[in-house]
Image: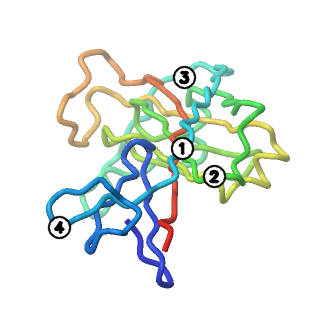
């Protein structure tokens, strides 16, 4: 729930969650819970978009991860990404990033992931078990021109000097588990 210039805006990834109980209740509502009334909300229609991923390069040998001056693992160089697995990500034709607020959500396993639009790096992420999320609205013009995104994931050695709750059982950790567009719905409450 966001309060902005005297208005209330609800935001959620699930349109069914766009609910607000207010006091005092609005006269138009008959849905009451004690002293609170359910605010009338125009529910948006749920939307779903499928992202397609086309692998264009297999991963090479995982990099050796040195320990730096402060006794922490050193991040990869640009040259290290020559050994990354690479995918081309295509958004659906009917998806327009300018009309809504959507995230590209990438669930992966590996050392580091990078997302590019054309040659422009738009996000990088050191693997921590959480999805990598990118707001698509801010890159609408670049997406229109490029037509696709590029995802690079470096494989992670099983003996890497970093903490992971579940160390890889194989020689290396590398997986692209899922990619989806998470639409974030917004509605303003009528006054």
Q: Badge 3, how many Cα within 10 Å: few under 14, some, many 20+? A: some
Q: CA distance from mark 3 to mark 4?
A: 60 Å
Q: Residue 10 placed where, x, y %?
A: 43, 61
The numbered disc on residue 35 is 4
88 up-or-down from 67: above or below: above
Q: Badge 1, how many Cα within 10 Å: few under 14, some, many 20+? A: many
Q: CA distance from mark 1 to mark 3?
A: 31 Å
Of the 4 image quadrants, the one containing the N terminus is bottom left
Nearest the viewer among 160 and 136 is 136
Residue occupied by mark 1: 183
Q: CA distance from mark 2 to mark 1?
A: 7 Å
Q: Residue 33 placed where, x, y %?
A: 18, 57
Q: Residue at x 32, y 58 (%)?
A: 38
Q: Residue 173 placed where, x, y %?
A: 36, 24
Q: Residue at x 59, y 47 (%)?
A: 78
Q: Residue at x 45, y 44 (%)?
A: 15
Q: Are marks 2 and 1 in contact (CB under 8 Å)?
A: yes
Nearest the viewer among 5 and 86 is 5
The numbered disc on residue 100 is 2
Of the numbered discs 2 and 1, the one sitting upstream in the chain is 2
Residue 3 is left or right of residue 55, and the answer is left
Of the numbered discs 3 and 4, the one sitting upstream in the chain is 4
Q: Quadrant of residue 81?
A: top right
Residue 29 is left or right of residue 101, and the answer is left
Of the numbered discs 1 and 3, the one sitting upstream in the chain is 3
Q: CA distance from mark 3 to mark 2?
A: 34 Å
């Amino acid at each position: 729930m966001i309060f902005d210039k005297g208005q209330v805006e609800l935001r959620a990834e699930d349109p069914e969650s766009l609910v607000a109980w207010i006091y005092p209740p609005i006269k138009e509502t008959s849905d009451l819970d004690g002293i609170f009334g359910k605010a009338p909300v125009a529910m948006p229609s749920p939307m779903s978009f499928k992202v397609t991923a086309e692998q264009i390069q297999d991963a090479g040998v995982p990099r050796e991860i040195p320990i730096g001056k402060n006794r922490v693992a050193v991040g990869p160089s640009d040259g290290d990404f020559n050994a990354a697995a690479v995918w081309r990500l295509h958004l659906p034709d009917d998806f327009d990033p300018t009309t809504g607020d959507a995230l590209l959500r990438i669930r992966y396993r590996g050392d580091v992931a990078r997302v590019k639009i054309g040659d422009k790096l738009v996000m990088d992420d050191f693997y921590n078990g959480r999805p990598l999320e990118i707001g698509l609205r801010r890159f609408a013009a670049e997406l229109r021109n490029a037509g696709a995104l590029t995802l690079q994931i470096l494989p992670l050695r099983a003996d890497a000097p970093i903490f992971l709750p579940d160390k890889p059982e194989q020689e290396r950790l590398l997986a692209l588990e899922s990619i989806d567009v998470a639409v974030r719905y917004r509605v303003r409450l009528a006054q």
